[in-house]
Image: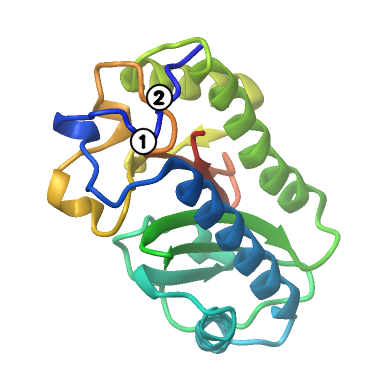
Amino acid sequence: MSTALSENAALSGKEAVGERFVLDTMRHAQQLTWKAVDAIAAVIKPGMLESEATARGKEILAELGMDRIWHPLLIRFGANTLKTFKQRSDGDPVLGEDDIFFIDMGVVWQGHEGDAGATYTSGSDPEMKACAAAAKALFDRVEAFWREGVSGVELYRYATDQAEAMGWMLNLNIKGHRVSDFPHAIHRGGDLGDFEQAPNAGVWILEIQIAHPTRPFGAFYEDLLI
C-alpha cells in the first residue's frame, strides 16, 4: 500500500506542503470539486456553445462558494477533447446531439486545492460512450496499481500498457501533478509521471487522457490519489 499522509507528516522536496495543510481538508476539497463537476455537467446540453458552457460553469462555481479558481475551468466539446490543458480550443464548437465533452477544473475550497475532471456524452454514439467509460476504467486500474506502492514513473508506464491493451491511445503529455494547500506551485513538485518515488496520498492528481484510435475525439478523467 502507498504510504498514507498524516496531517502531521513533515513532507519535503517534491511533496512539500504548507503549514495550513490538512489531509481531511484536501478530502473535503475533493468532494466539493466533484459536486461542482456534476452540477456543471447537468446543465450542458446539445446546442450550447463551448464558451457558453464555460461561462455557466464559472457562475456555478461562484454559487457553490469556492474560494477562487486556481487553474482555468476547461470545458472541451467534440474534437477539442483531444486538446491538452495548455492547448487552446479550436473555434467555439456547438455541442451536438451525439457528441462528447469533458470538464476539467481546479478550485480552491477552504484554502486547499481541489482538482477533478470527467468525460460525458450527449447522445448514444457507442464509441463515444465507450471512450468516456474507458478513461474512468483506466484511471481505476492505475489508481489500484498506485495502492501497491509503486513510483509515479511506474504508474504511467503501467497506464500506457493498459491503455494499449484496452484499445486506446494514452496522451503522455498529461502525466499528473501536485496539489496541496494553495498555492502548491511554490513547491515545484513536477509531474507525477516523472516522480521516482511512491507518491504519498493527498498531494498528487492522477490524470488520464486517451484518444480514439481512428476518430477525432478523446476522453479525460482525473482525481486526487487519496
Please tell me whether mark 1 or mark 2 is closer to you in this view: 2
Give the residue type that dot 2 points to: Tyr
Total marks in image? 2
Indicate whether 142 appears above or below 125. above
Q: CA distance from mark 1 to mark 2?
A: 8 Å
Circle 2 residues within 10 Å: few <14, some 14–19, many ≥20: many
Image coordinates of residue 194 in percent, x first then y, are: 24, 27
Color theme of the render: rainbow
- Can I make out residue 209 in this image? no
Tell me which corner region of the image, top left, top right, bottom left or bottom right, holds residue 110. bottom left
Residue 126 has which mark? none
The residue closer to the viewer here, 135 or 23, is: 23
Residue 90 in sight in this render? yes
Q: Position of residue 80 (x, y in %)?
A: 49, 65
| Residue at image mark 2 | 156
Residue 60 picture location, percent across and down: 59, 83
Q: Is disc 1 in contact with disc 2, using a CB cutoff of under 8 Å? A: yes
Task: Give the class, few, some or many, for how many residues have Cα within 10 Å of label 1's Cα (few <14, many ≥20).
Answer: some
Q: Closer to the camera, 213 or 165?
A: 165
Judged from this view, the residue extending furthest toward the right is 124
Query: Residue at (42%, 17%) from the top-left corner?
Result: 3
Relative to 160, is 111 above or below?
below
* Residue at the image position 51 percent from the left and 84 percent from the top: 62
Q: Is residue 133 above or below residue 119?
A: above
Q: Secondary structure at mark 2?
A: helix
Query: In percent of the image, x 69 and y 65: which residue is there?
Result: 38
Name the residue at 48% across, 84% down.
92
Query: In the figure, residue 41 lies in which quadrant?
Result: bottom right
166 horizontally vs 112: left or right: right
Which residue matches tag 1? 172
Please name the amino acid that badge 1 sits on.
Leu
